[in-house]
Image: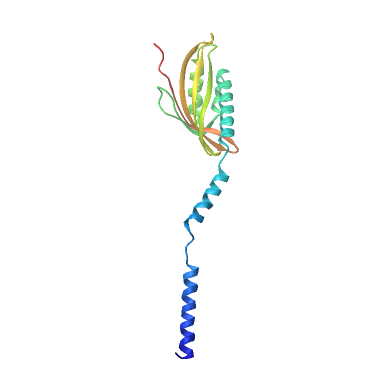
Amino acid sequence: MNKKTFLLASFWMLFAVLMIGCNTPETKPAAAEAPAAVESAAKPDMSKVKAEIQDLESAWAVADNARDADAVAAFYADDAVSLLNNKPMITGKDALRKDITGSLASKPKGATVAYDVTEVFGDENTVTEIGKITSKGADGKVMYTGKYMAIWEKRDGKYVCIRDISNDDVKAK
């Protein structure tokens, strides 16, 4: 083999080795580990989120028990949608305020309500809450119980309810 052929063959061989080496894909374990590390670092402390949502629900109950429709409506986003027991869908804060005003006006004197957050999931920006409702009469006896689900979204640094649904439990006979 002459020198020119040897150099040309060596060049192409070196070129092939470099091309193969530069195009070797990353191994799957390394790629799988990186997102998991980022994901675990970004997970919110859901016990803190649950406590924050419970604080909101407790304040909501205070406003409800004070029969303050404006204060209750303030927990909702302007574009909220509510699916309440035995009522048509209610869309928007103004419509919700009107419904809340009527509901509070028909509430028996001395009746109270409490909300108990049983579960939350999501992230720190959008949280789905599951909870229980207990309503008591002025005499302290339970009038009814129920359950609800609410979706909270953090807007301008605070949670607002964007969707909720609730219904009463079956009354004891």
Measured as percent of width and height from the top left, residue 85 is found at 42, 23
Q: Position of residue 117 (x, y in %)?
A: 53, 27
Q: Could you say which is closer to the camera, residue 109 or residue 130?
A: 130
- Specify the quadrant of the image occupied by residue 46: top right
**Image-quadrant location for residue 48:** top right
**Please, is residue 80 above or below residue 111 in the view?**
below
Q: Could you tell me which residue is drawn at 59 percent across and 27 percent down?
A: 55
Tell me residue 166's x, y (percent).
45, 25
How has the structure been colored for display? rainbow
Q: Which residue is drawn at 49% across and 21% down?
A: 133
Residue furthest bottom as drawn? 2
Left or right, 86 with reference to 34: left
For this orientation, the residue located farthest to the front is 1
Q: How many labels does the image show?
A: 0
Name the quarter where the C terminus is drawn: top left
For the residue pair 62 and 27, the one nearer the viewer reads as 27
- Front residue of 19/95: it is 19
Query: Where 44 sits versus 56, above or below?
Result: below
Task: Residue 14 in the image: state x and y as whole percent.
Answer: 49, 77
Q: Report the residue at 50% width, 22% height from top.
A: 100
Q: For this view, does 168 lie left or right of residue 66?
A: left
